[in-house]
Every structure is written in C-alpha cells, then in structure tokens.
Amino acid sequence: MAPNVSDGGTATVTRRAADETPNHADDHAPSHADPRTGRSRKRIEPIPTSTTGTSGDDGTSFSDRNNNTRNDCDYVAGEASEFRARIRWPDFLAQLFVHTGFVIGLVLLVTLQVKLYTFLWTVLLVWASGIGITAGAHRLWSHKSYKARWPLRLLLMFLFTICGQRDAYTWAHDHRVHHKYSETDADPHNAKRGFFFAHVGWVFLTPHPEVVAKRKIIDMSDLEADPIVMAQRRYYIPLFALLVIGLPVLVPCYYWDERPMVAFWVCFTLRFTTTLNIAFFVNSVAHMFGNRPYDKSISPVENLAVAIAAMGEGWHNYHHVFPWDYKTSELGSYVFNVTTAFIDCFARLGWAYDRKSVPVEVIARRAAKCGDGTRFLTDEYAHQDAVWGYGDHDLPPEDVAAIVQEQK
C-alpha cells in the first residue's frame, strides 16, 4: 500500500518518486545504494517459449509493462541508467517536524503526562483513520476490489481524511502507478532503491521522469466521476485543517480538559506520524522481508507484523499477484485482516457489494507455478508439472521439440 501525501506545505507531506538500483543476481535483495540515485533495469526479451500477451493462471497478463517484456516468473536484469533526484526542502522540513513531534508526543506518553481518555482517543483515531486508508483509499478507490454505496463512501472518506495522507484521488492515482510499474523507474517508492528510500525518502525527493510520465496515462476516469472523491479533492486544505488537526486536538481539550499542547503533540503529530509510518511499512518492509508464496520473481512479500499493524495489508505478495481481491489475502479468518471484517460487515448491511475474490484453484496453480514453495500445496498441484524423464507422456510437446532440436 502506498500512502499519498501532499504536494507541498508544512502541514502535510508529499508523494515523491523512486526508481531502481543496479542489477543484481538476486532481484529480491534490497539495495543499499544512495537513495538519491536512481538506476533503472530493463527487462530482457525472453527465449521465445512465451509471447507478449501470454496470460498467467490467475488470468492476469504478463504482457508488456513499461515497454518491457516479462516471461511468466522470469526476471532478467539489464542495463542501468542514471537519475539524480533533488531534495524538496519544504517536504523534508515537514517530515522533520512531524517526526520530531512524534518523539515529543511519545515522551509525554511514557512520562504519564497524558490523560487516559486522550490516549484512548488517539488509539481510536489511529484505528479509524487506518480503516479509511485500507478499506477506502486502498481497496475501494485504488483497486476497485468492491463497490460501496454513497453512505459507506462518505464514511470512508471522512475516516481517510483524518489520516492526513493527501486526497483520495491523488493517493489512488500514485498507488495505481505503483502496482502497474512496481519496482521500475515509474514506481513512486521503488523498493529496489533501498529501505530508507522506499520507506520515507521518496516523500521528499523529486520524482523520476518516468513517474511523471506514467501518472499521465493511468486511467482515473472512475474516480473523476465520483462526486465524493472529487469534492474531497477540491476542498482538501480546509478539510485537512478541520479533520487532521482541529477535530483530534479540540475534542480532548473541550470534553476532558486536556492541555492544548499535550493534545497537539499526541493527538496530532504522534497520531499522524504513527499512521504514516504504518502505511510506509507496507512500502518498505512488505517489499523486502518475508516469503513469496505466490510469485518469487517479484519484490513484495508476506509479512505478519505488517499485516497486524496495517490491519490486513501485509500479505503483499498475494496482493501484488491478485490486486483485485478485496481481502488482499487468501486468509479465511479476520484475525490478521480486520479490514476484510469491516467490509464484510457493511456488505451484510447492503452498503458494500460486488466483492471480488480469487478462486482457490487459481491461487493454488499460481503458487505451484511461480511461488517460492512456502504455500501449502496438495499433491495434485505440487506435482502437476513433474515428469519422470524423457518419454513421460506428461512432458510438454514444446520441451520434447526443444530436446530433439538440441540433438541435431
């Protein structure tokens, strides 16, 4: 999940760009290169056993992405190109301010200078605004993985605005670019450029030209037709002042006489920065540390800690393989996926509908074909492509033809 933050100003934070590191033999190893230097990889045309447009078992296309060809699970590193990003100082200072405020708020908490109700109010805001991100900006507006009637859309927009991660249109716009061109020059927070860049560096660095170019071609017509999304975009600055700062700070001051500065540092900066970094963990940790049961050739991973903190958004390998699944995982329970429980609850009320998911058979086929072997597979799926040797009737005809050709 890629949070979206403001294009400027000290009260909000900005979306910035990313691109890739030099080629490595292991494409999943995180880079520790200078985060201001972008290096792009070009996909090399594969051996012609698969053609552009070939579909995977999940129904997705492995066709040309960003003018590069991908052959099922194979990824080949190519030449590198240089890009030098610049620091955007207003955005850097905004990040410095909110993270300093986080430390101040944390000190107030651990030294017991915060009233109990203020602490509980802050926890409630973190949870509620998090649902606005996960069920709203992410699963609904970015991926269209389910549909919501206007009362639920309005509620989700209210909750999402509290988190302060820019307007939903911009958030979804960059997140679609991230999925379409993940770990390439066009990815706004490319994990190939190292942990720091993927986590927060992209926020205050200028975008790679490819990010700017790909933003222009991503289809956003569905959100442009949504009056709730466009109204929030139009009035975002006053909404930010009211719902990100005003409401969280004034409620504890008015109802239980919390000190104004305590309310500001705890209910605004600490709460805001906590939510921001939880979202950033999906961009960094969930692209580096974990297993890849569904596709070992891509960067995103399954990470339990991120899934717990981000209310179900840590099952990232699955999510990048099946981004239209409203559950963002194949879990059957709500224990590590609170957002799915929220959506299902409103589906019972009739406010959420057309929830999209992936058949178990499709998931199993994809895991057997491209996964790293960490997903449990039945014997049927685990051995479906196995052969005992030359002469086995299950040996694919194209493989037999290649063997015969090699013998000539």
Image (cartoon, rainbow, N blue to C red):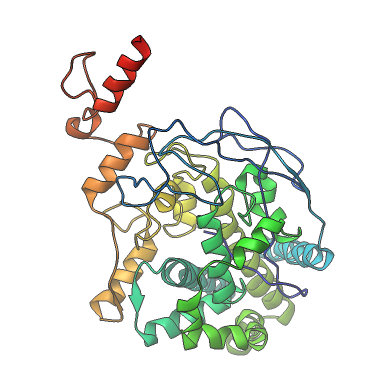
Task: Residue 217: give x, y in percent of width and height.
Answer: 57, 66
Residue 333 visible? The answer is yes
Give whichever of 181, 276 is nearer the camera.
Answer: 181
Q: In this view, does 25 lie above or below 318?
A: above
Residue at the extreme top of the image, as rendered = 407
Q: Is residue 61 left or right of residue 271?
A: left
Please identify the quarter of the rendering in which residue 5 is found: bottom right
Task: Residue 188: give x, y in percent of width and height.
Answer: 63, 57
**Quarter of the figure with the C terminus:** top left
**Residue at coordinates 67% horizontally, 64% vertically from top-left?**
15
Task: Residue 332: give x, y in percent of width and height.
Answer: 26, 54
Task: Residue 222: give x, y in percent of width and height.
Answer: 45, 77
Residue 375 visible? The answer is no
Q: Is residue 80 left or right of residue 134?
A: right
Q: In this view, does 55 lie above or below 297?
A: below
Give whichever of 186, 37 is nearer the camera.
Answer: 186
Number of numbered discs: 0
Give whichever of 360, 392 is nearer the camera.
Answer: 392
Q: In this view, does 324 lie above or below 297?
A: below
**Residue at coordinates 62% horizontally, 30% vertically from top-left?**
24
**Residue at coordinates 56% horizontally, 58% vertically from top-left?**
278
Q: Is residue 163 left or right of residue 36?
A: left
Q: Is residue 192 left or right of residue 74?
A: right
Residue at the extreme front of the image, as rendered = 408
Q: In this view, does 355 lie above or below 187?
A: below
